[in-house]
Image (cartoon, rainbow, N blue to C red):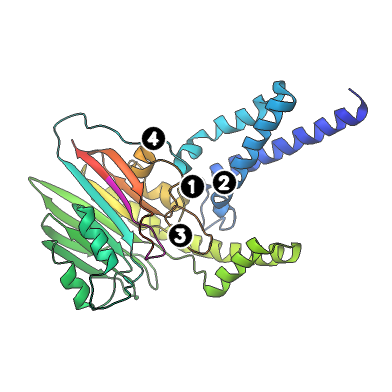
Amino acid sequence: MNVFGHTLRFFVLLANVFVGVCFLFCAYSQFLSPVEYPVFSCAGLFFPVFLCLDCLFLLFWTVVRLKYAWLPVVFLLAGWGSVQAYIPFRGKNEPIGNGKVLKFLTYNVMGMPSDKADTVNLIVDYIRKSDADVVCLQEYPASNKAIENQLSFYPYIEIVSSPGWSRMACLSKFPILSAEEIQYESESNGSFMLRLKMDEDTMVVVCNHLESNKLDSHDKEMYEDMLKFPDEHKMKSGGKHLLGKLAEAAAIRAPQADSVALALKRNYSPYLLVCGDFNDSPLSYAHRVIGQGLQDAYIEAGWGPGFSYNRNFLYFRIDHIFVGDGFRVLDADVDNSIAVSDHYPLWCTVEKL
């Protein structure tokens, strides 16, 4: 091979190494503290970009020079755990015993918008048809008697409010024994722990709405404009601005996640359900800390990326369900059949062991 060919191959290999290192940094950024490294901790958001690039290098080497295909494969294997977390391809599991099968649902309902006040709300109708045993709702509407009456097909309902405007509701087929707020600093978000009487056992439910990423309408318009009409100035100035806001929110969210994780440790039960709008991806500090020792239902039985946020081209799975080891996850899905809210509902079925 001539000098030009050797030089070109060297730079392509170098580019592959750069992409691979970035891929691994994104894959393991969840272990960085957002308080100490707010910007770097957001690297998980770029994981799919570098995953795609590494796969393109694998395809390139397979076609052009097979003996170098090992390089992108090594990077993929080193970050395989994060690949499975971000894009699980598990699918449905069959029950292994005679345990009771339960369904859990979490849904950020964005205030439960409805076109006509005199008809059944579309979200209420969806919840009714889901027939879930426990439903956790975030951004539940304030003082809406019509909605409360429409939800009365659930025998037990607990509506909780944080010091700010955020409200949540837990709808349950099981008696609700208690509800208490998990204390952490936030202007408008919150987490609540409830105890439910599940036959002869006590089930602990933690419903979360962690700190929002604080992207206002102007920020979202800027992001859409960057995607539709990219240029160097927009990408540099707009990207820096948006990343700064995301990093700021991540730094606030980290202590909230720590508080939830501590509360879970102190109140652990094998029959544990932790769910809600985390405002963070599966490769984030908040997801890792809260999910320690628990099963992520979507990772265990989901299929595909499962994007739960559906507006402004911000496609991420930021809603999550975790369960304790008293449950075996059978199925999980982000249901995009209803787009009334800016989130899709996330549900799972479990077998009680």
Provide the residue span drawn in magenta: 340-348
Do callouts 2 and 1 mark residues in contact (Cβ within 8 Å)? Answer: yes
Q: Image quadrant of residue 8? A: top right
**Which sits in the foreground, 17 or 108?**
108
Q: Where does label 3 land, which residue?
A: 310
Question: From mark 2 to mark 1, how far is it between C-alphas?
Answer: 8 Å
Quadrant housing residue 304? top left
Magenta residues: mostly which secondary structure? loop
Q: CA distance from mark 3 to mark 1?
A: 19 Å
Q: CA distance from mark 2 to mark 3?
A: 19 Å
> Between marks 3 and 4, how big is the CA–CA gap?
23 Å
Q: Which mark is residue 47?
A: 2
The answer to whether the residues at label 2 and label 3 have Cβ atoms under 8 Å apart is no
Q: What amino acid type should be assigned to the residue bearing mark 1?
A: Leu
Which residue corresponds to mark 4?
90
Q: Residue at x 27, y 38 (%)?
A: 330
State yes or no: residue 66 in magenta: no
